[in-house]
Amino acid sequence: MTGLSFCCGKKRYATERTARRALRFIDSVAVGRHPVRVYQCPRGWWHLTSQPTYGGTPR
Ligand SMILES: [Zn+2]
């Protein structure tokens, strides 16, 4: 995992913008179940999640 930053056991993103950019990329290449939205965790990092409504603050 060296070189990549993780939080909550997931890859972390510093800003909503970078998280959304990653989400859009994954959405364009992924097959099957994949993240559908981004959320900010209590530590202030952004993560991708495949949960439609659970796991973070709705925006
Ligand atoms: Zn986190």
Image (spheres, rainbow, N blue to C red):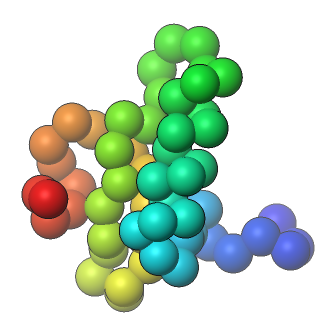
Relative depth, front residue between 46 and 15: 15
User: Residue 55 location in percent, x, y?
Assistant: 22, 56
Question: Which residue shows up at 36% across the image and 85% down it?
Answer: 44
| Relative height, residue 24 to residue 22 (above, below) | above
Q: Is residue 34 left or right of residue 53?
A: right
- Residue 28 in which image quadrant: top right
Q: Residue furthest bottom?
A: 43
Q: Can residue 9 be seen from the camera position used here?
A: no
Q: In front: 2, or 23? A: 23
Look at the image and tell me in which quarter the C terminus lies.
Answer: bottom left
Viewer-closest of 15 and 44: 15
Residue at 34 percent of width and 44 percent of height: 37
In the foreground, 7 or 19: 19
Q: Position of residue 36 (x, y in %)?
A: 36, 35
Residue 54, given in percent of the width and then of the height, sits at 16, 48
Q: Is residue 28 visible?
A: yes
Locate residue 5 relative to residue 35 in the image: left or right. right
Q: Is residue 35 above or below residue 42?
A: above
Number of numbered callouts drawn:
0
Q: Furthest-right residue in view? A: 2
Q: Quadrant of residue 43?
A: bottom left
Q: State the residue at coordinates (60%, 35%).
A: 26
Image check: 55 left or right of 28?
left
Q: In the rendered image of this protein, does residue 51 appear above or below residue 40?
A: above
The residue sitting at 50% across, 60% down in the picture is: 19
> Image check: 39 left or right of 53?
right
- Is residue 48 shown above or below 57? above
Q: Position of residue 50 (x, y in %)?
A: 36, 36
Which quarter of the image is occupied by the N terminus?
bottom right
